[in-house]
Amino acid sequence: MNNKWAGFIVGIIIVLALAWVSWQGSAWATKNLGDFGKALEYPLWAAVLGLIANLVLGALKFKDFIKPGVRTELFLKIGLVLLGLGINMTTVIRAGGGGVIQGIFMVTAVFLFSWWLGGVFKLSDSMRAVMSTAIAICGVSAAIAAAGSVLAKKEELAYVTALVIVTALPLMVIMPYMAQALNLSPTVAGAWFGGNIDTTAAVVGAGTIHSKKAQEIASIVKMSQNALIGVVAFILALYFVTVVEKGKEKPSARVIWDRFPKFVLGFIVASILASLVDAKGNNLIFSADALAGLGNIKNWLFAMAFVCIGLELDFSSLKQVGGAPLWCYLIVTVFNTVLALIVASIIFGVLFPV
Amino acid sequence: MKLNEDWWSVIVAAILVILGWVGVIGKAKGLINIPW
């Protein structure tokens, strides 16, 4: 067995163990710490344990070895497909419809604001593109797609990736409590998390901390937004070859499908399967036990993804974070937070209440 | 063609769903049942 596979297996075992400890911690706090303990939901435990493990494993020079098993996106996406089994197709269509409208508006407004502000801060065009896509669409994976389209430097990508995680973690924890303080309905709260928090794992984490309904709506809204990633990658690539670096080969529209998040299709199929019920409401394909079991596996996978957010943070990239890009990123995040609250309240509170 | 993480997530989820459909996951419910 080569080192990569050994690292993959050891990494998964460590992530699984930390997910289990985070559940134990959350259960213990709920029992012993009163209201404060109840507020410490498992995504928070998982992310903090991931951060601690990150520091410890880094100090022991063991982090690189287990890296193949630290797969935030993989665990999260499998979990999101399984989440579809618990959501009726009607909800997916209604929330997805609102999510696409919100997504188109938010992606355009936040991208253009970020692009303009990046110019004010005199950032390079490739840095502006990577940062704007990361904030406007879906954090790390969008940053990678944009970096590919505009041929950004490796350091620019690492820098933005670190910023995405550093801002997403506090937002994941603070936003659910802000939503409660603002007395938002679970639907509007979910749409707000989905429209604002950059990285999908933290969106699901914020929804989980708030409520089951908020978790569902946040996930659907974020997936609707993620589906736009290919379109943005294509437009960016086209802009760079026609305006910034004239004369290079024009990109193909195929990038729209290449960048399309395929797990969204899995989620939709799962939701269709979940909607096949008889007159009594029993699922025609799965037994109640099977659905309960798959629901539990989904919770395990989400907890593993939350652990990985903490484990994945690259502290060395953070050392470079500072100056103009940091300020630009923070200002756009505040803009995104306020705008997403207004847009989510209008779309999910008034136009499409789910 | 090299499969990316997106496709892998769909493949793994599909395997889990099939295991649920044939009854394996329902039977193992006790093992994985953690009341989150």
Image (cartoon, rainbow, N blue to C red):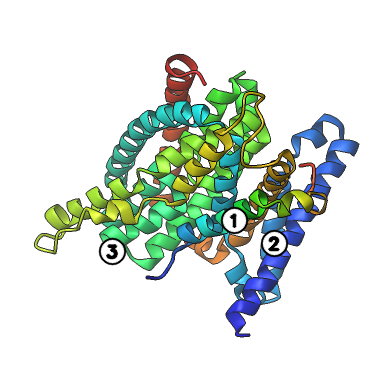
Would residue A117 appear left or right of A271 to someone viewing this image?
A: left
Same chain shared by disc 1 and disc 2? yes
Q: CA distance from mark 1 to mark 2?
A: 11 Å
Residue B14: image x %, image y %? 55, 54
- Mark on residue A215? none
Q: Disc 1 vs disc 3: which is toward the camera?
A: 1
Residue at (59, 56) in percent of width and height: A75
Looking at this view, name the residue that lies furthest to the left.
A247
Q: Which residue is mark 1?
A: A75
Q: Which residue is mark 2?
A: A15
| Residue A321 visible here | no
Q: Quadrant of residue A180?
A: top right
Q: Disc 2 vs disc 3: which is toward the camera?
A: 2
Q: Which is more N-terminal, label 3 or label 1?
A: 1
Q: Secondary structure at mark 3?
A: loop
Q: Nearer the viewer, residue A74 or A238?
A: A74
Residue at (67, 75) in percent of width and height: A62
Residue A256: image x %, image y %? 29, 51
Looking at this view, name the residue that lies furthest to the top.
A350
Q: Amino acid at mark 3?
A: Leu
Image vertical order of residue A17 relative to residue A328, above or below: below
Q: Amino acid at mark 2?
A: Val
Q: Which is more N-terminal, label 3 or label 2?
A: 2
Q: CA distance from mark 2 to mark 3?
A: 33 Å
Contact, mark 1 vs mark 2 (Cβ under 8 Å): yes
Q: Disc 1 vs disc 2: which is toward the camera?
A: 1
Q: CA distance from mark 1 to mark 3?
A: 28 Å
Q: Which residue is mark 3?
A: A151
